Image (cartoon, grey):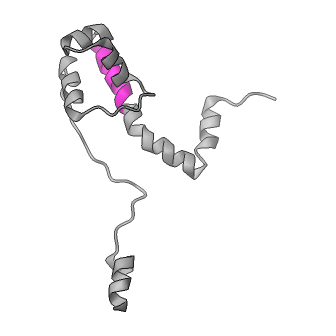
């Protein structure tokens, strides 16, 4: 019997709604950190060199880029990082595909007001 590939394992795991929800909740932070690493490397900087440009310690850059870190950086920190590697930060908001429009007539508050 062959061992499943990571792709197969991930595909199977994501069928579980709880696993999928947790995976999706972490996706933005994971993407941000991978993007930061890519931008730093594209700029040709080591963590040490970037830390020097930002007047901080290498350990702070390492923590910021670590995909397993639970620390959420401030927006100003991300902006400073982007500027130090020659980029500017641009944010965007995308609609959640599973979000259904709010229907006041069906809400619990609307039903309780109608019963009064």
Task: Mark yes or no: residue 31 visible.
Answer: yes
Residue at point 31%, 19% (across, down): 60
Where is residue 91, by image quadrant? top left
Horizontal placement of 109 versus 21: left or right?
left
Q: Main secondary structure of the magenta part?
A: helix
Q: Residue at 36% across / 27% down in the picture?
A: 33
From which residue to which does the magenta span run? 32-43
Q: Position of residue 10 (x, y in %)?
A: 60, 37
Above or below, comparing residue 55 to residue 25 in the picture = above
Q: Position of residue 3 (x, y in %)?
A: 74, 28
Asked which quadrant contains residue 106, the reply is bottom left
- Taking the spot 35% from the left edge, 20% from the top edge, the residue there is 37
Q: Nearer the viewer, residue 60 or 9?
A: 60
Residue 46 seen in render: no
Left of 22 or right of it: where is 30? left
Of all residues shown, which one is farthest toward the right?
1
Identify the residue at horizontal 64%, vertical 35% (top origin).
8
Is residue 41 found inside the magenta-colored segment of the image?
A: yes
Q: Position of residue 116 (x, y in %)?
A: 33, 91
Is 10 left, or right, of 88 in this rendering? Answer: right
Q: In terms of depth relative to the viewer, which is nearer, 13 or 60? A: 60
- Please provide percent x and percent y for residue 21: 50, 48
Question: Which one is nearer the viewer's eye here, 56 or 4?
Answer: 56
Q: Residue lying furthest bottom in this view? A: 116
| Total marks placed | 0
Q: Quadrant of the N terminus?
A: top right
Q: Which of the pair 5/79 is nearer the observer? A: 79
């Amino acid at each position: 019997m062959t061992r499943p590939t990571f792709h197969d394992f991930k595909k199977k795991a994501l069928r579980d709604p709880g696993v999928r929800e947790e995976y999706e909740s972490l996706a933005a932070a994971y993407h941000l950190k991978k993007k930061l690493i890519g931008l730093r490397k594209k700029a040709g900087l080591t963590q040490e060199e970037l830390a020097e440009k930002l007047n901080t310690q290498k350990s702070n850059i390492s923590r910021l880029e670590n995909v397993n870190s639970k620390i959420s950086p401030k927006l100003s920190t991300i902006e400073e990082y982007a500027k130090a590697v020659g980029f500017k930060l641009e944010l965007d908001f995308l609609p959640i595909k599973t979000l259904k429009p709010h229907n006041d007539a069906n809400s619990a508050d609307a039903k309780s007001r109608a019963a009064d």
